[in-house]
Image (tube, grey):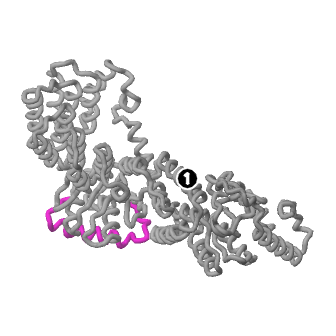
Amino acid sequence: MYTKISLLHRKSSSLSIANEKRIHQFLRNLCTAVERLDFRNSNDSSEMDPREGFNGGIQNRNGSSGEVSESIHTQSQSWGSNQGRNEHSRKQSPSLSNSQVQSQYQGNWYGTNPDYNGVGSSWHSGMTIDSEVYEMIEEFDEYCIQENVRVALTTMEKLEKKGYVMDLARLLRLTQLCMEENVFYEVSVLEEAKVSVLGKIRALVYNLDANYLKYYTDIMIKEFDTFCKQGKVKKALYTVDTLASMNHVVDLSRLLRLAKLCGEAEGLQEAKVVHGKISSSVSHLDVSSNHILLEMYSNCGLANEAANVFEKMSEKNLETWYIIIRCFAKNGFGEDAIDMFARFKKEGNRPDAQLFRGIFYACGMLGDVDEGLLHFESMSRDYGIAPSIEDYISLVEMYALPGFLDEALEFVERMPMEPNVDVWETLMNLSRVHGNLELGDRCAEVVELLDPTRLDKQSREGFLPVKASDVEKEILKKRSGILHGVKSKMQIFKAGDTNLPENDELFQLLRNLKMHMVEMGYVADTKPALHDIDQESKETALLGHSERIAFARAVLNTPPRKPFTVMKNLRVCVDCHNAWKIMAVIVGREVIMRDIKRFHHMKNGACSCKEYW
């Protein structure tokens, strides 16, 4: 009888409002009466699938079974995509029976049965859901669709005061909304909402059926895998927190995959968080897992954190030393890289060719070619390693990185083996980086002869080629959701932008800083100001460069003495680089700038790049 009534098509337009309310009340009372009768076979003790329902969606209130109607879950991984399809029918029926609620929320991931206690949501035993509560539940769903997090939370609190505890699916929907970037809310508001919702999930899961909880846990794990595949680091990290509130610890392999993504997206804060989660989940990491952490911190420019991981490793191999040496060299600590190699040999280890290539790179970044040549001689003399073409490519790079292009060409011409296309391409690219277009074009002609496929249109026209890996990396940074800026919120600055709300305050700070900079010996380098204007106007134009505006904004919006990082999508200009070093001393900060090619760690008036970038 219940099934027939609940599945009948209703013609609400022919009913008066009063009659319609009475019918709804009758249906709710009927649902309650039927639920209190146990129609299940008492001899049937087999465990039911969590997605199975019975009697058209009637749910057991004792919480012992774990049934969830199939109509809820047939498309459970579609996060609200079908909501609009069901909107009209819900508005026609302000109060429905259990099975109607479930069927009309079909395909909506967060639309579970509101009149359900023991598995999804909680409602005082023996009570039926009244129209006011049901309308509030509808409002909550509407606010979720509209991504109105604050009002949805307020509605949930009102429901809790009336004795209704929100079901797991809707709570998970709220966590998903907290992941989204929302221009209407400050990051702190979303963070507070996330903490509140995760706390409610943590309290709810203890009373849930194991099969029901596993069902949603599996969904969240799939969401995590999807976010990782798409490179959405921030959302993947939020999902880890959600799973933790559901008493599920993400396995090590997934956390390491997330750590690798943090490094590729250069997520400084996210990298530290992921490392903390890995440390809390396992007591001991193998060598390969520690290598992922080293690479992650190296890519994020966090050399000190990488060194801490290295020192705590109980087991190291040749690749471990190679990674830490490259990490120091890449982030401007070339001397530390060479010291690390000396320590390696002092401990009685025997280097291989790859480790020597790491030292050649460190000497190139440091600009100490003589040191690199001594190591090259030691390579064959002391360790009997015959140099390969890869070693000679590293030596060409060592010469060319600091700008010794003539010496690099001379080295190529007197190589004991025939230089291949990789040698000439390396010299071509680094010649163009240093502005020696003539040498770059000569090398391009040789590359064209050896392998015409190596040159694209940009290379033939004299430009630096854009690598596919670099393009993918930039795309990943945009997709990752990682916010580089003040208070974890994206701040974008453009040169000469005077439309910022705090424009006067920012430029007043920059002018005050300039006065102190001049007293410390600063002289503006106006070469980057290419406009045909007088000297004073050029200096004013330099004051409006995007990296300086970002510096001022960070100083005004971060706690005193706290380091901060600024990301730039181009190479930093010479004058701004000099200005940053002095401004960092004035404000007493350690600052990090990441331009398109490398990190610049500025402290005590010096930069880790050693004036080469």
Residue 369 percent location from the top left of the image: 12, 37
491 vs 1, nearest the viewer = 1
267 vs 534, nearest the viewer = 267
478 vs 493, nearest the viewer = 478
Alpha-carbon neighbours of circle 1 within 10 Å: few (<14), some, or many (≥20)? few
Tag count = 1
Is residue 562 rendered to the left or right of residue 199?
left
* Span highlighted in magenta in the image: 496-523
Residue type for callout 1: Asp
Is residue 370 rendered to the left or right of residue 588?
left
Is residue 184 in sight in this rendering?
no
Is residue 578 in sight in this rendering?
yes
Q: SS at mark 1?
A: helix
Residue 505 percent location from the top left of the image: 35, 73
Q: For residue 205, which quarter of the picture? A: bottom right
- Looking at the image, which residue is at 49% across and 47% down? 230
172 vs 358, nearest the viewer = 172
Residue denoted by label 1 = 218
- Looking at the image, which residue is at 33% across and 66% down? 554
Q: Residue furthest front?
A: 43
For the stretch drawn in magenta, the main secondary structure is helix
Q: Residue furthest right?
A: 14
Is residue 169 rendered to the left or right of residue 542?
right
Residue 555 percent location from the top left of the image: 30, 69
Q: Is residue 384 above or below residue 301?
A: above
Inspect the magenta stretch and tell me whether residue 161 lies in it: no
Is residue 195 rendered to the left or right of residue 561?
right
Q: Is residue 27 above or below residue 71?
A: below
Q: Is residue 231 above or below residue 503?
A: above
